[in-house]
Image: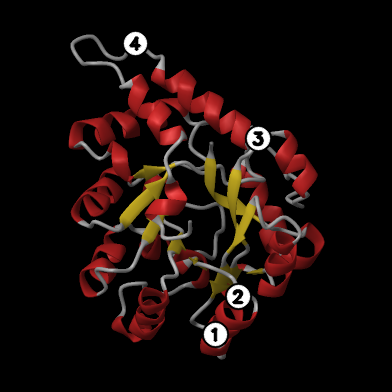
Amino acid sequence: MITDVHSHLFRHAHDFDDTFRAESARAHAGEVDLTVRYEEYAATAPPGTRTIVVGGKARRSGLWVDDAAVAAYVARRPEQLIGYLALDPTQPGWQDELRHGHQELGLRGIKLMPMYAGFDPADPVYDPLYAYAEQHGLPLLVHTGTTFVSQARLEYAMPRHLDEVAIRHPGLRMVLAHLGHPFEGECIAVIRKHRHVYADVSALHYRPFQLWHSLRLVQDYGVWDKLLFGSDYPFTTVDDSVEGLRRIARIPGIPGLDPLDQDAVEALLHRPSLDLLGLS
């Protein structure tokens, strides 16, 4: 069974401002409709796929998905979908949104977008957020790496900031999104140190050389077991992500170096991610 730890709920006309919609064209060649429809997602994923669904909140960048929309979306298919709330802790009332999303809406994790929202995730001022998540077993999915949004602060996407969080909150489960691209080496250094910190490989297969190089670093550092599968739907699909990873694994490699471990890639695709994140 495949578990997709990184998919989105977006309603294209409702959840973005005009600037975000226009700049999203940089993600691919031209603007795309980011509206999510479960039937389209399921048609491009293997049967039985379990999926974590996140929205997103970042007022600075023009993105705001209501947690209630995520809760309603996953409630229609509770056997397949698990919902996360989202927080922008630069905005007033985030503490109430955290309690409401968890205790009343029943959402089971937290999505944070530090670079999009413009906050340093290592700042101790956010320790109450992390302490709540640690106490209640809410895993974090944290955007790390680059983006197409001009207003986003690249500094706050560096994976090293989450090292500080993990040191202060060692029981907190975190997933660093997109293997921190193009700062994969830094991301690998962080996940290698901390028992409960992982990285997902979402939205990477369409940069094949970069992904091969990143997985080669993963192999050299011995952290295959810290990678989780994710798609980043609707930017790409589960099926395309699976095939992309398998295609990368078949590359013979550079003369003088071992190729990628194809068994390790298959294990990544079938990782029991919900068990690792405490969501079984």
Labelled disc at residue 99 = 1
Q: Quadrant of residue 61?
A: bottom right
User: Helix, strand or loop at disc 1?
Assistant: helix
* Residue on which disc 2 sits: 59
Q: Is residue 23 visible?
A: yes
Asked if 206 appears above or below 232 in the picture, the reply is: above
User: Helix, strand or loop at disc 4?
Assistant: loop
Q: Nearer the viewer, mark 4 or mark 3?
A: 3
Give the Cα separation between the discs numbered 4 and 1.
50 Å
The amino acid sitting under disc 3 is: Ala
Question: Where residue 59 appears, x then y in whole percent?
Answer: 60, 75
The amino acid sitting under disc 1 is: Arg
Closer to the camera in the image, 267 or 198: 267
Q: Residue, x 21% and y 36% (percent of image)?
A: 222
Q: Nearer the viewer, mark 4 or mark 1?
A: 1
* Residue on which disc 4 sits: 252
The amino acid sitting under disc 2 is: Arg
Give the Cα separation between the discs numbered 4 and 3.
27 Å
Q: Nearer the viewer, mark 3 or mark 2?
A: 3
The amino acid sitting under disc 4 is: Pro
Q: Nearer the viewer, mark 2 or mark 1?
A: 1
Labelled disc at residue 45 = 3
* 35 sits left or right of 155 in the view: right
Q: Residue, x 27% and y 51% (percent of image)?
A: 191
Q: Quadrant of residue 70?
A: bottom right
Asked if 207 appears above or below 167 in the picture, the reply is: above
Q: Residue, x 27% and y 14% (percent of image)?
A: 254
